[in-house]
Amino acid sequence: NLQNARNYSGYTMKNQGNIFIFLIVFSLIFFILIYQSAVVQIIHGSDYAFKASNIDISGERIYPARGMFYDKNNNLLTKNTEVYDLYVNPEDFLNMSSDKKNEYPSLIGVDIDKVIKEDNAGNEVIGKELVKISGNLDFNSASALYKKLNEAEDAFQFKMNYQREYLLPEEFFHIIGYTGLTSQDDLNNGYLPDEKVGKYKLELQLEDQLKGITGSKDTVGGSEIIEPSVPGKNIFLT
């Protein structure tokens, strides 16, 4: 009986030790999950909100990633960097209080009222059609600006676009060429105002292969309908 009691006592202490270790591990896991949740909500919350703001625009076009160029050894010669353009709703901005109308231009570094008037030159009525006031912002800059404009988010909207970069410009400039903003002829051929199109050499000659297919995001009856964009074709030089 004494031996059984000793065995039982040892088993109980061992079992209690296992439970204690389990509780410590469980507490640590719980603490880590709470911490990560706090990081997401507090530290990265504004960044996620900024990303979400770019998918809430009804009728927005989704620009495709332009096809890449590679040399004969499969080395990348171009890349597309995500950038953000900032737009303002003229009607919403002009209906702001005088304090806000004076505050936001200084935050953005743009004379918004002047840009709106220039964009609507010749129009009798200034409406809700978005006007681009800043462009080619990297994610960090756009996210920081979004936080500053958060109170007036209905008046300002960000749209993602791509900026073309050439990794070996000196060696391949006269082969690959370059892209640029759309001209009136491009607009007449169905391009959108903020799209980048080939302007010189292979970027121009292979435009149809490189440009991809533009997608769209629309809201119909409260439901979001997304038509994904299709990236352009990659070109391998020989």
Image (cartoon, rainbow, N blue to C red):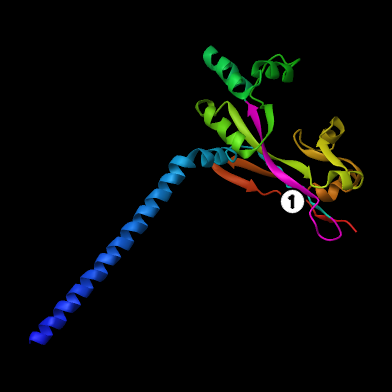
Q: Position of residue 153 (x, y in %)?
A: 54, 29
Q: Farthest residue toward the left?
A: 1
Q: Position of residue 31 (x, y in %)?
A: 35, 53
Q: Position of residue 144 (x, y in %)?
A: 56, 33
| Chain part drawn in magenta | 71-88
Which residue appears at 88% of the width and 48% of the height? 206
Q: Which type of secondary structure does the marked residue at label 1 adopt? A: loop
Considering the whole magenta stretch, tell me its main secondary structure.
strand
Q: Quadrant of residue 72?
A: bottom right
Q: Position of residue 135 (x, y in %)?
A: 69, 31
Which residue appears at 12% of the width and 85% of the height? 4
Amino acid at circle 1: Pro
Of 212 and 189, the residue lying toward us: 212
Q: Which residue is mark 1?
A: 231
Which residue appears at 41% of the width and 45% of the height? 38
Of 122 and 46, the residue lying toward us: 46
Which residue appears at 32% of the width and 61% of the height? 26
Q: Is residue 51 above or below residue 209?
A: above
Q: Is residue 48 above or below residue 147?
A: below
Q: Is residue 97 visible?
A: no
Q: Is residue 74 magenta?
A: yes
Q: Is residue 75 left or right of residue 15?
A: right
Q: Is residue 188 magenta?
A: no
Q: Is residue 232 above or below residue 106?
A: below
Q: Is residue 178 left or right of residue 125?
A: right
Q: Is residue 230 visible?
A: yes
Q: Quadrant of residue 28?
A: bottom left
Of 224 and 12, the residue lying toward us: 12
Quadrant of the image for the C terminus? bottom right
Quadrant of the image for the N terminus? bottom left
